[in-house]
Structure formats: structure tokens, C-alpha cells
Image (tube, grey):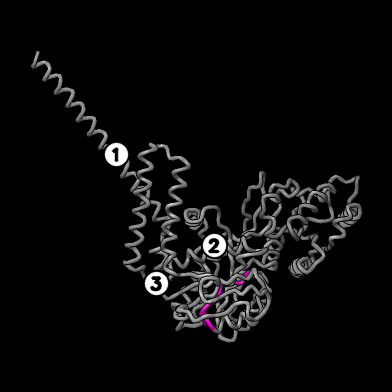
Amino acid sequence: MFFDNIKHNLIIILCILLMINGCNDENSKLIIENNYKAEKTNKTFFNKNNLKKEILGNRITEKNNTKLKEENNNIIFEFRNERLLQGRNITNNIKEEKTRLALSAVQKMFKKNLSSSDNEINLKNNDKISTLDRYNFEKSKSINYQNIIVFLPLTGKYSNFGNKIRKSLDLSILNFGNNEIKLIYFDTGKIIDQGLIASLFNELRPKFIIGPFTREVLIKIKPFAKKDNIPILTFSNDIAMVENNVWSLGFSPEEQIQSVISCAIMHGYSKFGIIAPDNLYGKIISREAIDLISINEKNSYSSLFLSNENLNNKTNLYSTLRRYLQYSETEETHTKFETILIGGKKEFILEIAPLLAFFNVDSKFVKILGTETFNSKEIKNEPSLEKSWFPLILSKKNEQFKFLWKAVWGGTNDYFSNAGFDAGIIGINYINNLQKNLLYFNNIEGPVTGLIIDRNSYVKKPIQVMQIEDLGNLTKIKKCSKSKD
């Protein structure tokens, strides 16, 4: 009986030991999986060692690598604990926690004082709106930096664009900057004057300018930058402002019309209609379209400009469009135009397009052309605009940058965030090669967008003409791409 009990107890002890060993194996496996996944994510997330060597020609310091590794290890450790608690099914909460931890690590590195706003450095706001002394400058250690001044609308009408560009610039300085280069953000959403701009340049002595977003602010900045031969990468889409030392990263109306009209002519369309708002923008896109259409004397065109008064008077609008389209109730299909360009704001386009369909202009047979404005959810889902064409800038490495953007900031990136990241890297590289001066701008390529900058102030952008399909999906039009081969 005694021996039987001992034998029975030994069997129980052996089973317990086997169960403990099994649990230890399972935990080890979980840890390996998490380390593997985190290591794989990290390579895609920052992917900066190889990219930095390609762009800047040097390596990240061992100190930075060690710090980054330590911070990433902290992220892995905390995420691992979540995984052990929750089991194998990764919930949305865990994903959110991982993103939060990644962002926290990035924000800790931002504390290196790599960038500042006008409220943080040597500018004090005295709340006077438009006087010369709205800001007072104080002596600051920032004068020892190689300063890049960034003019962006961080408040006001265009603040959504400005703040998105700022985030992308912070990513560029984090991944490719050094302790000698500093971004200084200046909010152009507030009223500024020449005296304030003069003080800004005199005190900070910038080596490079990024921004502004609008033509009005660029006019104020250009004289000071030109005097000191300081390069400007602006996001304004007014190509009339481009000259020596000024490069436009914006998608100008002229570039948009040139892309989509040239594509239509290449595909054999020759009879063009142009419907545009009766304002400066409408005149610009109409003139650009007519210049391209008129190159071949076999092509024909007819323009229609509509004012706000025309749009508000529905009876008059219907009569005007009916005459312009030569609508006949006895004809089932439209015959006057092979293609019709609609230019204007989203509201203008959504007002006109359904009326064209009402007057037998079927977008499946009469090619509707548009500008970049067509790249909106409402327009892409408008039935009367199915099969229409419009130009779009397709960044070369958008998918890679999309992962980085989502992991750090959340949400989605766009052309302006991509161009902002490239502008930051180009500015940093320019400062690191100051001995070359403007010779540096010799077919410089943006690593994310793929845009190419040359010394003649020309920016070649990766433009592609797209077609709107069912449910708002997009497809590329063959032979209508303008990018580096």
C-alpha cells in the first residue's frame, strides 16, 4: 500500500513537471514571435540606415543607434506583456497600444531640440496684429544652429495642410538631421508684414527656406531670400513665382491641364469643350488648354465661362448649357464634343456634371476631363463622372512612407506630407553640402515622391492621368505618365 502510494505520487509529480516544462516552452515561443515581428516591423518602420547613406552619404551615429535600439526594446517588452495577457488574438486595443508606444518613443527623440516654433525660440508675441513690433526678438542660442525656417499656415484657413507638412518635416529631421541643423516653424496663418520678415531673416540667418503654402506670403519672403541667395522650396502652386533659387513643389493648374489635355490628344480626341468658372483660375486653365489644343490645326475647341450669378440662376444655367451643348431632344447621343474639360472647385464640378448627363453627355462616350480636384470621394462616386480622366501625382515610394506615417502619426499621408518629408531631406542635404552652394541642385530626387529638382528651378513631378471606375476606383491611363524611367 505504501509503495503503491509512492508510485502514484511519483506519477503525479512527473505529470506536474511535464506541464510546467510545456508552459515554459509555450512562453518562449511567444517571446520569440514578438521579437521577430517587432524586428521585422522596425526595419520597415524606420528603414533609415540604408536610406540615409543613399541620400546623405553618411551613417547614423552609434549613439543614436543605441538609443533607438533601447527604445524599441521597451516597445517590444510592453507589447509582449500585452500579448501574454490577451492570448494569440491581437485586438484593436493592442494595436493601438503598440502605435502609442511607437509614437512615445519618437516624441522622446524630438526632445533633442531639433525643431522649434515661433513661440518657443526667440520670438515673443505682443498681441498686436499688423504692426512691425508684433514679435520681439531676443538673443538665443539658436543663432549657433544652421537654421531652416519653415513658413507654414499652422492656424487659419490652410492649417490642415500646414500641420500635416510640419509632421512630415519633423520625421525628416528626426531620421536624417544632426545636432547642428534646426527647423524653425513660423505660422503664416497670422498676419505678417515686411518688417517682421526682415527681422526674422536678420536674427536667424537661415541657410534654407521651406514653404510658404500661398503665393501671398511667398511674395513677402522672396526679396530677403533672393538678397542672400537662400534656396526656397515652396508649396505654392503658382509657377509664375518660380525663378532662380525658388522651386515649386505644388501641383500647378498649368501642370494639371497640360497632363490631361496632352493625354486626350495622344489618344486621338480632337473636338474639345471647356467649361470653367468665370474667374482668374478659369482663365488660366482655359488658356493653357487652348494653347495645347491649338498646336494641331485639325483640333477644335469652344469655351464656356460661368459666373456665380449663372450658377445661382438655375433657369438661366439650364438654357446656357443647352445652347452650348447644342442639345436636341431628337438625338439620343451628344455629337458636338468628343471631350469636355470641367475646371473649378468641387461644388462647381458637382453642379455641372449631372446637368451634362441630363443633356445626353454620357461620360462613357464623351470623355470628361478634370483637374486634381476630381480626386475627392464625392466626385469619384458621382455617376455622371464615371470614366472621366484627371491628373494625379503618384509618389514613387508612397507605400513605404505610408507605413511610417501611420505608425508614427496615424491616419493617412498624401502628396503634401510626402513632399514635406522630401523637402526636409533636401534642405538637410543642402546644408551638409554648403560648399557646393546652388551647384547642389543638379537633378536632386526626392526619396519618397520621386520628384526631380534641377538648377534651372524646374521640378519634374511623377504625374499620372487616372480614370474613375465604378465605386470610385481608379486605374492608370496608358502612355500618360510623366515620371522618371
Q: Which amino acid does label 3 sit on?
A: Gly
Image height check: is 438 above or below 12?
below
Q: Which of 394 and 10 is in front in this view?
A: 10
Where residue 32 appears, x then y in whole percent?
31, 45
Where residue 456 appears, x then y in whole percent?
59, 79
Q: What residue type is labelled 2?
A: Asn
Q: Is mark 3 on a helix, strand or loop?
A: loop
Label of residue 418 in the image: 2
Q: What residue type is labelled 1?
A: Asn
Q: Which residue is drawn at 39% across and 72% down?
A: 57
Where, by quadrant of the figure, is residue 266 drawn?
Answer: bottom right
Ranked by sequence position, the earlier of labels 2 and 3 is: 3
> Distance of mark 1 from mark 2, alpha carbons?
41 Å
Q: Around disc 2, counting alpha carbons within 10 Å, would you say few (fewer than 14), some (14 to 19), or many (20 or more)?
A: many
Where, by quadrant of the figure, is residue 260 drawn?
Answer: bottom right
Q: What element carries label 2?
A: helix
Residue at the top extreme, as displayed? 1
For the N terminus, the image quarter is top left
The residue labelled by disc 3 is: 57
How many marks on residues? 3
Where, by quadrant of the figure, is residue 268 drawn?
Answer: bottom right
Q: Nearer the viewer, residue 329 or 319?
A: 319
Residue at the front extreme, as displayed? 126
Where residue 286 appears, x then y in whole percent?
78, 66
Q: Can residue 370 be seen in this view?
A: yes
> Distance of mark 3 from mark 1, alpha carbons?
43 Å
Magenta part of the chain: 203-213
Q: Which of 195 and 163 is in front in this view?
A: 195
Where residue 449 appears, x then y in whole percent?
54, 63
Ranked by sequence position, the earlier of labels 3 and 1 is: 1
Q: Nearer the viewer, residue 160 or 335?
A: 160
